[in-house]
Image (spheres, rainbow, N blue to C red):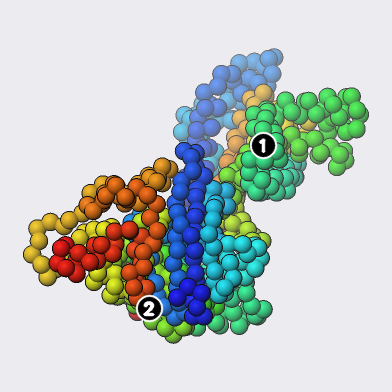
């Protein structure tokens, strides 16, 4: 197991290198001279040239990239071109807001989608199931930012129940959390439903019935545990997604998270900040996926068997048959 | 015989249909048979003859949305299982009647270790501590020839034959009075088949249970069963002891079945299969379901057939059975 985790961590390296290279290269192609932007329109060409030399902008892209990675490995992601702050501390300072929002919306997704999906599966074809399915289809198709703006209009502007933006109290988190989790709740409800329906048709459920197990036990111990496998995957993906990419929601509700930071800095062509944001998001995504996979192995022993050393040789087959 | 004290299971005129998108499939159309205590009864028939449906009805495990019992009764120790409410029926399953299924690859829960799955059968019926149940599960594993240390392993760590042993252990751990084995060896390798059959036969004697063995393999029946019921198109068309049915098959279908088996003592180039197919369960003929394929068919065959007792408990659902028997005795066939 530990070996597997290490292997996965090592595999992160080429992934992150690849992502940083692509982002670095694309950003270096964007028009505009960063030295000119930093110094302002009144700077003389000599000043600009000196600045370019100082920033190493005259070097080829590859060389600059290698230098950047070298610095990044020492924890130095450079300084912001627009504010002169250290980029690393900037991104980390913003992360708690993003994390809190992602975590809350994940909790809401889990709390709603699993019971709703199970309910739908159990009442398959009934009114409750149909209503849930229609609602989830609508919610899955609703853009997050639109839902956010609509809620703002209703609850902040008309009813004046909730604050529109900022983060002054817990009330500020209500609407962003709902807006962010709506789509993933909807999708996950459908997945839970489909998964439960699939599992309760399996042969081993019939075996459990044949041994006289109580229906409640069959549902809890046999059906649900198997049905949760695909659900964990999807939840992990959506959590990773919202950790990194709550750009829209953070913008709509003016939440100073990583997503909002990235948009601000893209507008200012603050390449070090943007790069750091992208790398950060990529790492978070990869790590959350790794955690999901490890979690998976706790639910499904078949997956675990692939990770542990003993069965790395390939699972035993007919060799074990009969004494 | 029916009604007598040593009758364990008595199925009478069982009628079961499935609702499908294409209409109503009449899977079982008046199955009757009896199973005595301690006996092994073979239920033989082609795919689609209604064997598994009959077994599921006895277990109360017909698919709830589509399967429907339309008539008949299944008396188990004099109690009709078909009218039993849910909870008493659940208590019977696994405790008094249990079942081994055809495909061991999918019959076990992949995320639960096999010891737990065996112990669960005990704990569903007895107030027994977890450790005691696990100990009994270990004993049971050893009885089916698996070291008890493997109780903590998961189904994917076992081969097909081993999995079927686990399924057998689950079925027998409560020492049921009746074991229904639904083609328990069909999905297994030929080399493993004999071992598993032997195991079932041995455990049946050890635990002193009765068995309904569903199969389409007449060789298996000859080795394992005392009596046999041949099913065709949802009916038992011939029933008797192994000797009666194998030595003197009176229903033309049974006769045809034996013609489809290679005989190693005789030099024949070809087998004699029965021409045609089993009737469509969506539109069954009025009279004898086999008439369209029968070499002995007469106009009288288009009337519903009732069972003819040919003496000694040998029954055939063919009005010409006595005639055939007489002609065969006279060397006419």
Q: Which chain carries label 1?
A: A
Question: Quarter of the image containing the N terminus of chain B?
Answer: bottom left
Q: Mark 1 points at which residue?
A: A130
State whether residue A60 appears in this view: yes
**Residues at discs 1 and 2 both on one chain:** no
User: In the drawing, does residue A172 fall left or right of residue A39?
Assistant: right
Q: Which residue is drawn at 47% across and 29% down?
A: A60
Q: Position of residue B187 (x, y in %)?
A: 35, 62
Q: Name the residue under label 2.
A: B201
Task: Tell me where residue B196 sits by quadrant.
Answer: bottom left
User: In the drawing, does residue A214 fall left or right of residue B41?
Assistant: right
Q: Distance between the residues labelled 1 and 2?
A: 50 Å
Q: Residue at x 81, y 38 (%)?
A: A174
- Which label was assigned to residue A181? none
Q: Where is residue A51 in the image (x, y as percent from the top left)?
A: 61, 25
Q: In this view, does B55 lie above or below B295?
A: below
Q: Residue at x 59, y 50 (%)?
A: A196
Q: Depth check: A256 or B219 in front? A: B219
Q: Is residue B274 above or below residue A241?
A: below
Question: Quarter of the image containing the C terminus of chain B?
Answer: bottom left
State whether residue B163 appears in this view: no
Q: Residue furthest right?
A: A160
Q: Residue at x 53, y 32 (%)?
A: A23
């Amino acid at each position: 197991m530990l070996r597997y985790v290490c292997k996965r961590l090592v595999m992160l390296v080429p992934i992150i290198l690849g992502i940083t290279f692509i982002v670095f290269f694309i950003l270096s192609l964007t028009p505009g001279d960063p030295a000119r932007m930093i110094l302002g329109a009144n700077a003389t060409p000599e000043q600009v040239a000196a600045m370019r030399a100082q920033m190493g902008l005259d070097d080829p892209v590859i060389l600059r990239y290698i230098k950047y990675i070298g610095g990044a490995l020492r924890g130095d992601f450079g300084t912001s071109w627009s504010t002169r702050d250290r980029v690393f501390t900037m991104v980390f300072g913003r992360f708690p807001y993003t994390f809190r929002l992602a975590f809350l919306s994940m909790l809401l997704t889990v709390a709603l989608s699993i019971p709703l999906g199970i309910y739908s599966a159990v009442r398959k074809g009934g009114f409750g199931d149909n209503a849930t399915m229609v609602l989830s289809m609508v919610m899955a198709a609703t853009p997050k930012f639109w839902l956010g703006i609509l809620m703002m209009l209703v609850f902040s502007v008309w009813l004046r129940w909730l604050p529109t933006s900022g983060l002054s109290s817990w009330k500020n988190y209500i609407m962003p959390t709902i807006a962010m989790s709506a789509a993933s709740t909807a999708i996950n409800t459908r997945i839970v439903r489909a998964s439960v329906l699939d599992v309760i048709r399996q042969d081993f459920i019939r075996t459990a019935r044949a041994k006289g197990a109580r229906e409640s036990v069959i549902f809890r111990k046999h059906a649900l545990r198997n049905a949760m496998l695909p659900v964990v995957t999807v939840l992990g993906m959506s959590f990773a997604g919202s950790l990194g990419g709550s750009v829209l929601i953070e913008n709509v509700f003016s939440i100073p998270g990583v997503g909002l930071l990235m948009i601000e800095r893209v507008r200012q062509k603050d390449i070090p900040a943007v790069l750091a944001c992208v790398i950060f998001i990529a790492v978070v995504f990869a790590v959350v996926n790794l955690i999901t996979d490890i979690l998976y192995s706790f639910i499904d022993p078949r997956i675990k068997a692939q990770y542990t050393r003993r069965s790395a040789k390939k699972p035993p087959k007919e060799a074990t048959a009969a004494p | 015989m029916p009604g007598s004290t040593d009758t364990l299971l008595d199925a009478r005129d069982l009628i079961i249909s499935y609702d499908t998108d294409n209409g109503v499939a009449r899977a079982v159309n008046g199955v009757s048979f009896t199973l005595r205590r301690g006996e092994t009864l073979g239920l033989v028939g082609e795919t689609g003859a209604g064997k598994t449906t009959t077994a599921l009805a006895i277990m109360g495990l017909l698919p709830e949305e589509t399967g429907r019992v339309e008539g008949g009764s299944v008396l188990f120790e004099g109690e009709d299982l078909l009218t039993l409410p849910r909870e008493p029926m659940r208590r019977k399953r696994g405790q008094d009647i249990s079942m081994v299924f055809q495909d061991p690859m999918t019959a076990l829960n992949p995320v639960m270790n096999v010891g737990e799955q065996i112990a669960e059968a005990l704990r569903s019926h007895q107030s027994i501590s977890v450790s005691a149940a696990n100990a009994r599960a270990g004993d049971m594993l050893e009885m089916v020839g698996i070291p008890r240390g493997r109780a903590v392993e998961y189904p994917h760590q076992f081969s097909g034959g081993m999995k079927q042993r686990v399924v057998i252990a689950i079925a027998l751990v409560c020492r049921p009075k009746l074991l229904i084995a639904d083609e328990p060896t069909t999905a297994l390798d030929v080399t493993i088949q004999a071992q598993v059959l032997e195991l079932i036969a041995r455990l049946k004697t050890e635990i002193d249970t009765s068995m309904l063995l569903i199969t389409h393999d007449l060789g298996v029946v000859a080795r394992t069963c005392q009596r046999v019921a041949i099913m065709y198109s949802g009916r038992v068309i011939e029933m008797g002891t192994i000797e009666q049915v194998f030595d003197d098959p009176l229903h033309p279908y049974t006769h045809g079945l034996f013609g489809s088996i290679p005989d190693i003592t005789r030099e024949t180039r070809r087998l004699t299969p029965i021409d045609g197919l089993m009737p469509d369960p969506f539109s069954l003929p009025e009279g004898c379901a086999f008439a369209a394929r029968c070499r002995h068919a007469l106009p009288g065959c288009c009337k519903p057939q009732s069972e003819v007792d040919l003496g000694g408990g040998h029954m055939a659902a063919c009005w010409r059975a006595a005639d055939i028997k007489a002609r065969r005795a006279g060397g006419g066939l």
